[in-house]
Amino acid sequence: MRIIIGIPAFNEGKNIASILLKLKKISKDIIVCNDGSTDLTGNIAEELGANVIHHKKNLGYGAGIRSIFLKAQEMNADILITFDADGQHRIEDIDSVLKPMINNEADIIIGSRFLDKNNEIPKYREIGIKAITSITNSSIGKKLSDSQSGFRGYNKKILDSIVPSDSGMGVSTEILIKAAKKKFRIIEVPIVVSYEGDTSTHNPVSHGASVILSTIKFTSIEHPLKFYGISGIFFLVLGLSFLFWTIQLFTESGKVVTNISLIGIGGIVIGIILLVTATILYSIISVVREKTK
């Protein structure tokens, strides 16, 4: 069984050497995606024998995960473990992710920061992660505790059927949405993380915005009738209600209330646009899916 460890890294020269030296005791197959680093991250990884993918410029976390997925597939990996390069994760927890996968208990295993009560996660991060996870859960129909953890295990079925496309932090949600659609098994295991020195390089505001936009994008693609259709019906009903109100007021007083009539017309126009969008997208996506079967 070929186990590959993949590490997306951007300017992690201070951490990468110690992480790689420890990881080499677990697997000799290590992929480091040097995502346009301006320090010695890539050089250090190469010197220590990692299989290094170089991005000429910083493309984003999601682009790094995509490159690692493609390289792992090329190397015929049976299991891919993705591991952050910022020093937050413990090498010892790899066993917790590996064991259920080796036992074929799941297709994706997420190392959750919230299943181990000893973790002291900064409050603002905890609130943000839980909010994003709630949005993700509503999109995939599952109840996860930590949808944004970068510490994950993927089996060969995932590598052969999912190619991430999001270049930002939304890639974690994208993979889960695509996996849930294909009915892949997703479970979580507890891991321990360290936030000493606030090692994460991800801005929590841009992270949250990226994930929310990514969730909206992929949900709208997977369920266009539900996503646009329900909104379209809401605005159409709202617009018609205000339009009837306008007509009623006009019959009673002979005057047109501009604000109410504008809301009515605007609601109808938006509702029609959304319903047409839902129909067109559904038709296009259905044709594409038929051709790819």
Image (cartoon, grey):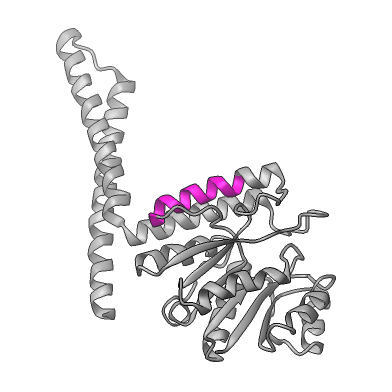
Front residue of 275 and 28: 28
Farthest top residue in view: 253
Q: Residue at x 28, y 17 (%)?
A: 257
Q: Quadrant of residue 231?
A: top left
Q: Residue at x 46, y 72 (%)?
A: 105
Q: Residue at x 27, y 44 (%)?
A: 230
Is residue 58 magenta-colored? Answer: no
| 133 in relation to 63, above or below | above
Front residue of 256 and 288: 288
The reply to whether residue 165 is in sight is: no
Q: Is most of the magenta stretch helix, strand or loop?
A: helix
Q: Is residue 286 left or right of residue 204?
A: left
Give the residues drawn in magenta, as a range: 128-141
Residue 28: % across, % down: 69, 89
Residue 113: % across, % down: 63, 55
Q: Residue at x 26, y 80 (%)?
A: 293
Q: Is residue 179 left or right of residue 279?
A: right
Q: Quadrant of residue 68?
A: bottom right
